Structures are given as C-alpha cells and as structure tokens.
Amino acid sequence: MEFQPFTKHDLDALADFHALALVNHEPYTGPPPTWERLRSGFGESRPGTSQRNWLARVDGEAVGHVSLMLGTTENLHLAMPWIQVHRDHRRKGIGTKLHEFFVERAEEEGRDTFIANANEALPESTEPIDGAPSAFLRRMGYTPAMTSLHSRLDMAAVPEGAHDELAAKAWRHAEGYELTTWVEGVDGGDCPEHLLEDLAYLEYRLTTDMPLGDMDYEPERPDAERVRERARSALASGQTFCNAAAVHTATGKAVAWTFLGLSRDSGEHAFQAITVVDPDHRGHRLGTLVKLANLAPARELRPALRYVDTDNAEDNAPMIAVNTAIGYRPAHASVTYQRKI
C-alpha cells in the first residue's frame, strides 16, 4: 500500500478523494460533498489547527483516505484521525493499516492522545446508522469519552408564527439587550472590529464551560486575531458564516453569540455551530434570541434552506431545551472516542 499526500491543488488526487467520498456517503448526514466545495475548501483548517491528508493506493487505485488533524496553539498533546475505506475494499485490513499510518505520523508530532468521532443510533433515529466506525475505534483501543446529541431543525415542520411567538416570549426576559447580525466569508466580509475582543472572550467561555465528558482537552484561548482569522478561513474554504450577537446596551459589550455555516452549494442544509452566553448574562433567553435571529439572514442568502443541524453534549440540558423549543429534533448520537498511548 502506498500513501500519497495531497491537497486541494492536486486535482487528480482530489478527484479520486471525491469519488471515494461519494461512494462512502451516508445520506442521513446531509448532502454529499460537491466538487466545487472540495476545490474551494478541502483541507482548510479552522484557526489554531492544521490538517494533512493522504490517499491510500493499491496498484494505483485509491482504496482509502487518512487525515491527521492537530492543534497548533492549544492541545499540543492531541491528534485527530479521519479514516475512510472504500466500500468495495472493507474487511481487508486496510482500515487498520490506515490507522497505523496515522499513529506513526501523530507520534512524529509528539502527540500521545487521539480523539475521533463516530455516529451511533438513538431510539428515535429514523434512518439506519452504520455502527462499523464505532466498532473499528473500539478495536483500535479507543473508549467513549463524551456523547453529543445530533439534532436537526426542519423549518418546513415549524408551525407558521411559532418562531415569532417564541422570540416575543424571550424578549420579555431580555430588557436591556439588543441584537446585531453580520455575515462573514463568501457572501459577506469581516467580523465588526468593535466586537472582536468580546467574541474572543465568549469563545473562551465556550471551551471552558462546555461539558467535555472524559476528554483530555485543553480549553482554547482565542484572541481577537483568531476570531478575525475565522472570517478569512471561511472565505478561503468557500463558506459563509451568518452571525448574531446580543449586546448589553448599558456596557456595549456582546454577551451572547452564535454562528451558522453555509457552503456555496449548501442548498437545503446548514450547520448551527457555536452558541454561547456569558455566564453573567444567562437567564435572559439570549441563546434563544440569537439563534432565531440568524435564521432569517441565512434563508435570504440560501432561499432553499430547510434543514439546520447542530450538536450538543448530551448533558448540556439548557441548550438542548433551547433547541427543542426552536424545533430541533434528535437524529443520532455523535460519540467522541479517545485513546491514550
């Protein structure tokens, strides 16, 4: 087996990766990756991380893919694998060889803790979930460290006026706050300069306050430049981020923030990412308000948008309750597995 390093600029290798991704695509995860999306965004890392990719070839044929993702500022002990084996070549030991290759590269970087995610079925899951990735990780010596709930909002299923009513109720608890929205990336520009420090603090709070289960994970320490870099990263990867923040009018500080990710070809689908509220300003329904405020601009940019997916740690009951009120429903579990060497 030969391992070929590649980037989005190696078009022949990228085409082979695209074919592999299409063959392995699971419909329940959303739309398959398009060539345009890969050409613009494959291998682009969020600020504070790096990513390297290899195709595994047997007699010239691409039979698998392995990625090494690393923290470059925090979590210098961690490495994150992404491993795929072509459906027609499974149960031949290829996945094990890909993982061995990943471990060798990770150890060369001085990493001794690995974390990887696998989807698993819930009792309420309506589509079949392949249990092979979880079984593979257990065979490789990983153990479950945290479970997240993956939920989906179907906006076509939300009764007319329900979101307006929910927002009106939330505003009764939010006197002294106002909302601001902006768009970053392909369809927008940069984060407003006067909010950068506030958003950096909020992102820090997110990584220090969010449940982590048994993960050996160091809270990130973002600064204004890293927040600014996110908009640049979105542009480089062909993405658009719709942002909403709640501003405390007495101080002018942003005290709640969320963003939602769209790709150029996202069509019906989007992903709800960060939502965080400053602990000193919780209890005012700000999480509900910023999430609702983001939906309208997202639909203006993508009129076909219907589904929004999100993840929450299973023991993050307050945010799950917010999502449930908005209309999100559980789809499957996302389990983070960990291995230490």
Image (cartoon, rainbow, N blue to C red):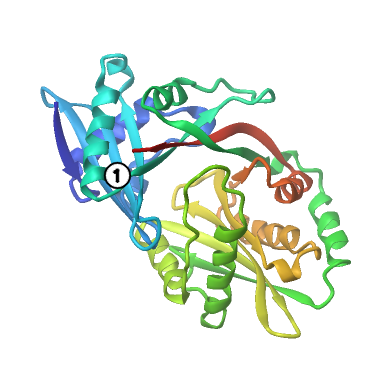
Check the image and report above or below for 241 versus 337: below
Which residue is depicted at the point 53% across and 71% down? 200
Question: Of residues 227 and 304, which is closer to you in this image?
Answer: 227
Which residue is depicted at the point 67% across and 72% down? 255
Question: In this orientation, does residue 153 appear?
Answer: yes
**Extreme residue toward the front, this view:** 341
Mark 1 Cα shell of 10 Å, populated few (<14), some (14-19), many (≥20): some
Question: Of residues 25 and 89, which is closer to you in this image?
Answer: 89
Residue 261 image point, x, y percent? 52, 54
Question: Looking at the figure, which quarter contains the C terminus?
Answer: top left
Left or right, 324 with respect to 330, comes to right
Local secondary structure at mark 1: strand
Q: Amino acid at mark 1?
A: Leu
Which residue is depicted at the point 27% across and 17% down? 89
Which residue is depicted at the point 46% across and 73% down? 223
Label total for image:
1
Left or right, 278 with respect to 56, comes to right
Check the image and report above or below for 129 versus 218: above
Occupied quadrant, residue 275: bottom right
Left or right, 89 with respect to 156, comes to left
Check the image and report above or below for 161 versus 54: below
Left or right, 88 with respect to 196, comes to left
Residue 88 image point, x, y percent? 30, 16
**Extreme residue toward the left, this view:** 59
For label 1, the residue is 68
